[in-house]
């Protein structure tokens, strides 16, 4: 199965921006839906944003208008542009293949850590 490697995380002040990247070990052309998920300390992992091959996107209410997901099948990559970051966005971020209902497959990469200071 395709392996995914996330990058682009870091420490940023509130109001700042980061762009996360997800590089796949193989083609994602045949993978309909991809998603970015995050897990904050002490909380369950949640869907942040998802995108299908047809360009349909889905965002968590907490990030609508601030985050933008995109994918480049030619580069086997998925991106998450995060603007107007808030301290509550602090979490480990993961990309993954999304199944029905945006449920992630049970195989995770190492993720990338995002810390937003107030």
Image (cartoon, rainbow, N blue to C red):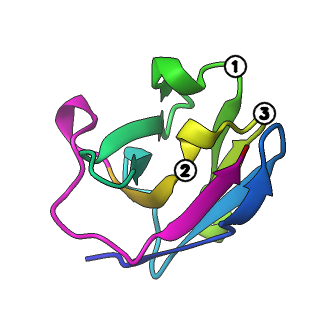
Mark 3 lies on residue: 84
Q: Is residue 78 visible?
A: no
Name the residue tied to disc 2: 90
The residue furthest front is 118
The foreground one among 83 and 1 is 83
Q: Report how far apart the C-alphas of labels 3 and 2 lie in the structure.
A: 12 Å
Q: What x and y, as percent, mark residue 114?
A: 60, 60
Q: Determine the image quadrant of residue 11.
A: bottom right
Which residue, given by chain and number where applicable, does mark 1 sit on?
65
Residue 97 in sight from this viewpoint: yes
Stretch in magenta: 98-117
Q: Earlier in the sequence, mark 3 or mark 2?
A: 3
Above or below: residue 62 compared with residue 13:
above
Q: Residue at x 66, y 59 (%)?
A: 20
Q: Does 50 sit above or below residue 2?
A: above
Q: Are marks 3 and 2 in contact (CB under 8 Å)?
A: no
Front residue (pair 46, 33):
46
Q: Which mark is residue 50?
A: none
* Left or right: residue 62 compared with residue 41: right
């Amino acid at each position: 199965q395709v392996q995914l490697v996330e990058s682009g995380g870091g420490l940023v002040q509130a109001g700042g921006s980061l762009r996360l990247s997800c590089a796949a070990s193989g083609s994602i052309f045949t993978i309909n839906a991809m998603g970015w998920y995050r897990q904050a300390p002490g909380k369950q992992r949640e869907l942040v944003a998802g995108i299908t091959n047809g360009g349909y996107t889905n965002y968590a209410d907490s990030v609508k208008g601030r985050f933008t997901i995109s994918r480049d099948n030619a580069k086997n990559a998925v991106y998450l542009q995060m603007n107007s970051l808030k301290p509550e966005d602090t979490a480990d971020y993961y990309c993954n293949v999304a199944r029905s209902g945006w449920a992630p497959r049970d195989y995770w990469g190492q993720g990338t850590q995002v810390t937003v200071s107030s």
